[in-house]
Image (cartoon, helix red, strand yellow):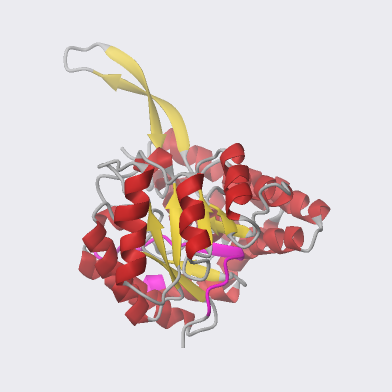
């Protein structure tokens, strides 16, 4: 029996490990899921943005979800990423997730083709609700990735019509005013989950938002610490939550990594360019540097530049200095020496683009 969907606490937007040949690394994925569960995470989120879903074949996509459900063993929830920019694909993926035993399905707003909010509601979310009964659906609003956004008004229509089928939203707009409108229109019955690690506490501490937890990238690295942070805030202990959040801040700032690089043109001219390495490239580099077998990101994502890798390394060093207990579970679970890996120039040089 799958665990019932609980839209609160700390959920991990899982990376998808690949082997040296670029194939899905099922044993490494199982190990990663087991680590998350051992560290007290509320639930697993396979095949989302962090899991590089755009580069997974549908066969791989289904395999990842099945493996997450198998690893969860009903102990924690599984919120399966099933969104697409094609409604028929989302229907098929959501149906598979339901049959595989997922607790709920996470549907990102349709990317690239950019439907209006009305079209998102009527031709996407309502279609999946109709054609795939029983499983709860969670809209994922991230206009910075999708180029479109389900409005607060259309979200409210979906939720208020069927609160059991659409009990929560993953909010990654970065717009606190928009989130407050979500709460005003949807009422107290809908759960708002943070999709941005660095905004989680702000969203939870704002009574007009009433965020109940996070679907996190950085729980791939520090699941226990983030789970404790969210739990403390949920109990009303803002002081403890803020203390943990302050120590985690160097990692929260690095879900994406910006660096200035030099380009040399064929005619010898040079220019400076800002490279923005987006999730999951930085977190995968950090995990690989720490000794977790996740492999590289799939093309078109690739290795970061040496300065970007160094920024990630320094952030980990800072966290390890102020709160070594946050990273130590990796050492114990994966059998690595965190101190040695953080101090090994060779380890981090190997992760950088030459």
Dominant SS in magenta: loop
Query: Residue lying furthest bottom in this view?
Result: 1
Quarter in which the C terminus is drawn: top left
**Drawn side of residue 251 relative to residue 50, left or right:** right
Image point (31%, 56%), residue name: 124
Image point (66%, 60%), residue name: 225
Q: Which residues are magenta?
A: 4-29
Image point (63%, 56%), residue name: 187
Q: Is residue 201 visible?
A: yes
Instruction: Give the number of callouts.
Output: 0
Q: Position of residue 198 (x, y in %)?
A: 60, 45
Q: Is residue 19 magenta?
A: yes
**Drawn side of residue 57 relative to residue 291, left or right:** left
**Drawn side of residue 243 relative to residue 335, left or right:** right
Q: Position of residue 200 (x, y in %)?
A: 63, 50
Q: Nearer the viewer, residue 58 or 31?
A: 58
45, above or below 195, in the image? below
Image point (66%, 59%), residue name: 188
67, above or below 173, in the image? below
**Quarter-of-image position of residue 145:** top left
Q: Nearer the viewer, residue 180 or 11?
A: 180
Q: Is residue 296 visible?
A: no
Q: Is residue 272 magenta?
A: no
Q: Position of residue 192 (x, y in %)?
A: 58, 56
Q: Position of residue 207 (x, y in %)?
A: 73, 49
**Quarter-of-image position of residue 144:** top left
């Amino acid at each position: 029996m799958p665990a019932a969907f609980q839209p609160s606490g700390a959920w991990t937007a899982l990376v998808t490990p690949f082997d040296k040949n670029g194939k899905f690394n099922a044993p490494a994925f199982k190990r990663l899921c087991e680590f998350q569960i051992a560290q007290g995470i509320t639930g697993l989120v396979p095949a989302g943005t962090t899991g590089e879903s755009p580069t997974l074949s549908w066969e791989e996509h289904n395999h990842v979800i099945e493996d997450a459900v198998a690893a969860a063993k009903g102990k924690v929830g599984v919120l399966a990423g099933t969104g697409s920019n094609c409604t028929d694909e989302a229907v098929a993926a959501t149906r598979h997730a339901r049959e595989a035993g997922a607790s709920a399905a996470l549907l990102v707003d349709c990317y690239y083709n950019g439907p209006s909010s009305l079209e998102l509601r009527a031709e996407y979310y309502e279609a999946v609700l109709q054609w795939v009964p029983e499983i709860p659906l969670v809209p994922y609003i991230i206009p910075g990735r999708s180029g479109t956004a389900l409005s607060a008004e259309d979200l409210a229509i979906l939720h208020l019509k069927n609160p059991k089928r659409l009990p929560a939203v993953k909010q990654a707009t970065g717009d606190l005013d928009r989130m407050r409108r979500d709460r005003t229109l949807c009422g107290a019955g809908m759960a708002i989950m943070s999709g941005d690690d660095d905004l989680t506490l702000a969203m939870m501490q704002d009574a007009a938002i009433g965020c109940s937890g996070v679907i996190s990238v950085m729980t791939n690295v520090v699941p226990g610490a983030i789970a404790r942070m969210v739990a403390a805030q949920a109990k009303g202990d803002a002081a403890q939550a803020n203390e943990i959040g302050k120590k985690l801040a160097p990692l929260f700032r690095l879900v994406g990594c910006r660096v200035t690089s030099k380009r040399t043109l064929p005619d010898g001219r040079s220019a400076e360019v800002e490279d923005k390495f987006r999730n999951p490239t930085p977190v995968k580099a950090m995990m690989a540097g720490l000794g977790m077998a996740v492999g590289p990101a799939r093309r078109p994502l690739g290795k970061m530049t040496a300065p970007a890798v160094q920024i990630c390394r320094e952030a980990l060093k800072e966290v390890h200095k102020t709160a070594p207990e946050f990273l130590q579970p990796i050492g114990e679970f994966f059998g690595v020496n965190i101190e040695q890996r953080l101090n090994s120039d060779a380890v981090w040089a190997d992760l950088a683009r030459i």
